Amino acid sequence: MTNIKFVKSEPVPLEMHKVRIVQKIQLIPLEERIERNREAGNNAHLLKNEDVFLDMLTDSGVNAMSDKQLASMISADDAYAGSASYYKLEEKIKETFDMEFFVPSHQGRACEHLLSRVFLKPDMIIPMNYHFTTTRALIEKAGAEVEELLIEEGMKPESDCPFKGNFDIEKLNRFIRDTGVDRIGFLRVEAGTNLIGGQPISMENIHKVTGICKENGIKTVLDASLLADNLYFIKTREEAYREMSVLDIIKEISACFDMIYFSGRKLTCARGGGMCFRDEKDYKKIRDLVPLYEGFATYGGISVREIEAMTVGLEETLDEDMISQGPVFIEEMTKLLTDRGVPMVTPGGGLGVHLDCKRFVPHVEPKEYPGAAVACALYLVSGIRGTERGTLSEDRDEQGEEVIAKMELLRLALPRRVFTLSQIKYAVDRIIWLYENRDLIGGLKFTEEPEVMRFFFGKLEPIGNWQDKLTEKFKKDFGE
């Protein structure tokens, strides 16, 4: 995908697929967007999709399926137990990850739920490069804690570090020494740190981290939900892996871990998930809970049609054109924005582009949710829906005080094979206009605040009349 030369123009990302099924979208008028935003309580998660022009909320479950995936769903074996579709997936898992044991689940967070139930006890501490919202919430529900051991470079929005998702090895050694092995249920590696810009972890770092764990008898778990993007970065940013096949890279990663789980909604572009295991005892501990919380062990809460699509999706993950599409589009969009001075997380990672809202709206206080404010502002002026990844995505502490996020981002996800380059350029145009008018953006405050994962269902209102001022300026420049 990245090797095609252009002679008469500047090179641009070139899609290595053609579009054969389309879905109509609409850009509703400004006045309707104002009303829809108000009804949703200034929370992008509560907008109806029919009111959204470009949905960049997430890549979870909204990646475009291939023709082969859709075709495979027709021939699914629709059985409750012993489905042939399941055994196809099980065999593909073994081929891909070189692990003998597998259980399906309805998505990645279901795997995290089962992991927390089986391997965690109160007062345990789980080290990881960086947390994800549901991961930490489930660990804390089990009475345990999360310890982030990310390198310092990972928390710098602007950087040229190619692997900002790496562990700090010195911190890891010190953590094990100070905590004690008995209090560490497992170590979790997130391949593509979601909340800090989809930043990858290097193969070199994976080997070091898991090697230390093996020496100390600590179980290792890989969250492979964003593995496809991470594979691309290993192949293009680590010299030793440039000529290695994608499958061989996956196998080398897998050999480092005791357990691997993933959201099929991300990794395979189909709606499911699963876990694979190296040790049969670990497998049986999880397997026995699957019928209780998910479904029988050969469907795990997933439609067998989706199981067929997951099998094909894993095979397509071995295609370099497939794993490069997201990162290359993200890199292009990040470049178009940074060239115009918009503060971004650099280098571009996986999953989507990330606006650095601490610099985008430095006048908005952290307790006034700058990331969420920029998300609302962008929807109003463009119809684009993104996701705040900052203080609003944190929960309050035990004293009811705000936990100020280390990074304050607006994530604009780019689901694979969904958006065209013209749609990307539309988004860039509106973001640039918004940045030029950033002084008009103000903060938000809660009117309804759930206690847990408030960013999903909470409702907010603007502090002052800044949204009126912003939309009046928009009308002046763009009309209705």
Image (cartoon, rainbow, N blue to C red):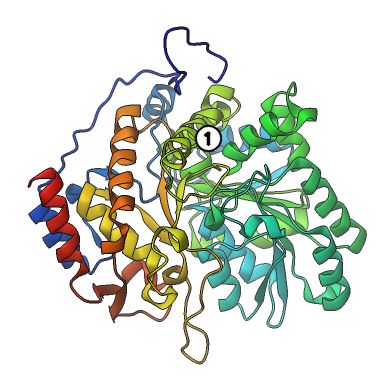
Question: Which residue is rendered at x = 35% and y = 28% of the image?
Answer: 421
Tell me where residue 242 appears, x and y as whole percent. 73, 25
Which residue bears the numbered disc 1? 327
Viewer-proximal residue, 111 or 156?
156
Tell me where residue 183 appears, x and y as whole percent. 79, 76
Tell me where residue 93 appears, x and y as whole percent. 64, 37
Tell whether 246 sits left or right of 280.
left
Residue 119 in sight in this render: yes
Question: Which residue is rendered at x = 52% and y = 50% of the image?
Answer: 345
Residue 454 placement: quadrant: bottom left
Question: Which residue is rendered at x = 47% and y = 7% of the image?
Answer: 7
Viewer-proximal residue, 108 or 44?
44
Tell whether 216 sits left or right of 414.
right
Tell me where residue 234 appears, x and y as whole percent. 69, 35
Residue count near mark 1 (Cα–Cα under 10 Å), binned few <14, some 14–19, many ≥20: many
Residue that sits furthest to the right in the current view: 215
Q: Amino acid at mark 1?
A: Pro
